[in-house]
Amino acid sequence: KQEVTQIPAALSVPEGENLVLNCSFTDSAIYNLQWFRQDPGKGLTSLLLIQSSQREQTSGRLNASLDKSSGRSTLYIAASQPGDSATYLCAVRLGNQGGKLIFGQGTELSVKP
Amino acid sequence: GAGVSQTPSNKVTEKGKYVELRCDPISGHTALYWYRQSLGQGPEFLIYFQGTGAADDSGLPNDRFFAVRPEGSVSTLKIQRTERGDSAVYLCASSLNWFRASSEDTQYFGPGTRLTVL
């Protein structure tokens, strides 16, 4: 059974810091991995999607990497801003189970001005 | 264009009552998903549709839960005889295609319906 774990559960950093969020998964037979952002009381916003054949994706100050063999992904946020404060969720899609996503429990990020 | 919309945004009901939660996906998206999110947890898969048919309903917790998508667009999640443990945020998502290895696979989420069972 695929399990997705995110560490740390919560993180507080001063504005301007570069930071890394971690995601690990137990079954390496994934189809893709997606990082989401969730603001309090809101739905999820897709940040980056990495296909199983890719190693990384970049969007602005965000960079996500994927290492299937070790079952890990990282989300790197450069020059953090207070507006980055939110919960970040990673989710994997398995190759043989259609489109459903299996989520980690999230990392709650707080960026202090 | 318009994103995924869900109604109602909040629903308070009493134990034992029946509720319906509605999802309007992005126009043209063939795949539609339902997830449930408890406080402090990531979303948990319930069911997904490809077109009108339920392609995978393995996440539905028991037979009190049922979902339909009769015309391949709007979907309704139905919960019978609600229990306090059903309280959660119910999220709906849609994607252009689930079987294409491309950005069309990206799931777009609605704001959710917060269900509270008293």
Image (spheres, coloured by chain):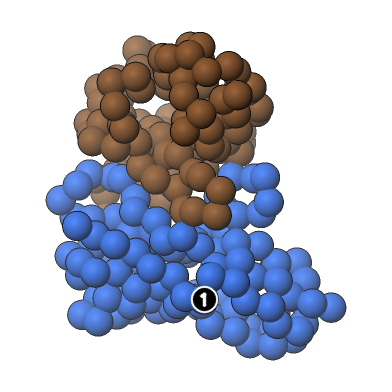
Residue at the spot 73% in from the left edge and 75% down from the top edge: A111
Q: Colour of chain A?
A: blue
Say which residue appears at 23% left-offset and 36% top-offset: B58
In which quadrant of the rendered image does the C terminus of chain A lie?
Answer: bottom right
Residue A47 seen:
no
State which quarter of the image contains the N terminus of chain A.
bottom left
Q: Nearer the viewer, residue B116 or B101?
A: B116
Q: Looking at the image, is A94 positioned above or below residue B62?
A: below
The residue under label 1 is A8
Question: Where's residue A14, x and y in %?
Answer: 76, 84
Quarter where residue B46 is shown? top left
The image shows residue A20 at horizontal and vertical percentages of: 53, 82
At 60% across and 28% down in the image, what residue appears? B116
Dot 1 amino acid type: Pro
Q: Residues within 10 Å of mark 1 (few under 14, many from 20)?
A: some
A74 relative to B2 in the view: left or right: left
Q: Position of residue A98 (x, y in %)?
A: 22, 44
| Vertical placement of residue B1 versus A5, above or below | above
Residue at x 70% of width, y 67% of height: A85
- Residue A73 appears in which quarter of the rendering? bottom left
- Choose top left, top right, bottom left or bottom right for residue A32: bottom left
Q: Which tint was used for chain B?
A: brown
Mark 1, chain letter?
A
Circle 1: element type: loop
| A77 sits left or right of B43 in the view | right
